Amino acid sequence: MTGTVHLGAGIVLGIAYAQYSNADTLGSISIVAVTALGALLPDIDHENSKLGRRVWLISWSLRRLLGHRGLTHSALALVALVALVARTNSTYVIALLVGVASHILLDMLTRRGVRLLYPLPGFWRLIP
């Protein structure tokens, strides 16, 4: 999946979540921005991704340590965000979670899939 597709999904879901949360104009813009960032965040483990090119050294290091579509594309990452939501109940953390979850689901629609149960081996996908 391309960064543009992930970004577009994050923006659309951010608009929907902002509408759902009855945010004011500034809050809505912030929610959309955070959801869009969340939709790009899992690819921080790849230095050629939209986000990875902006934080190249971090991305390069993460790819060497974890590989691409590993920890950042896993249920473990989602559980960590859900725990943060439960602890903070922040609209922005929820927006980040929505973006990250959309990224993982979209990557599960590719032939490669994701290592959903990282660190266990095996890729999960939603297509045959």
Image: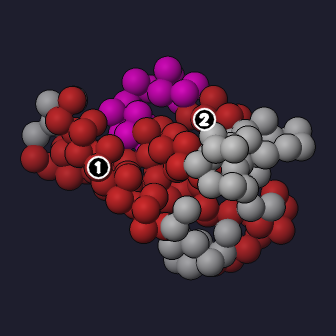
Identified by mark 1, the residue type is Val
| Rendered view: 38 above or below 116 | below
> Which residue is found at the position 67% from the left and 69% from the top?
46
**44 left or right of 91 in image:** right
The crowd level at tag 2 (other Cα within 10 Å; few <14, some 14-19, many 20+) is: some
> Which residue is found at the position 50% from the left and 22% from the top?
87
Location of residue 89 in the rendering, given as x and y in whole percent from the top left corner? 40, 24
Residue stretch rendered in magenta on the structure: 82-96
> Which residue is found at the position 53% from the left and 49% from the top?
106
Pick whichever, 90 or 13, lies toward us. 13
Identified by mark 2, the residue type is Leu
Query: Which residue corresponds to mark 2?
Result: 78
Examine the image and state in which quarter residue 6 appears.
bottom left
Query: Which residue corresponds to mark 1?
Result: 12
Location of residue 71 in the rendering, given as x and y in whole percent from the top left corner? 74, 47
User: In front: mark 2 or mark 1?
Assistant: 1
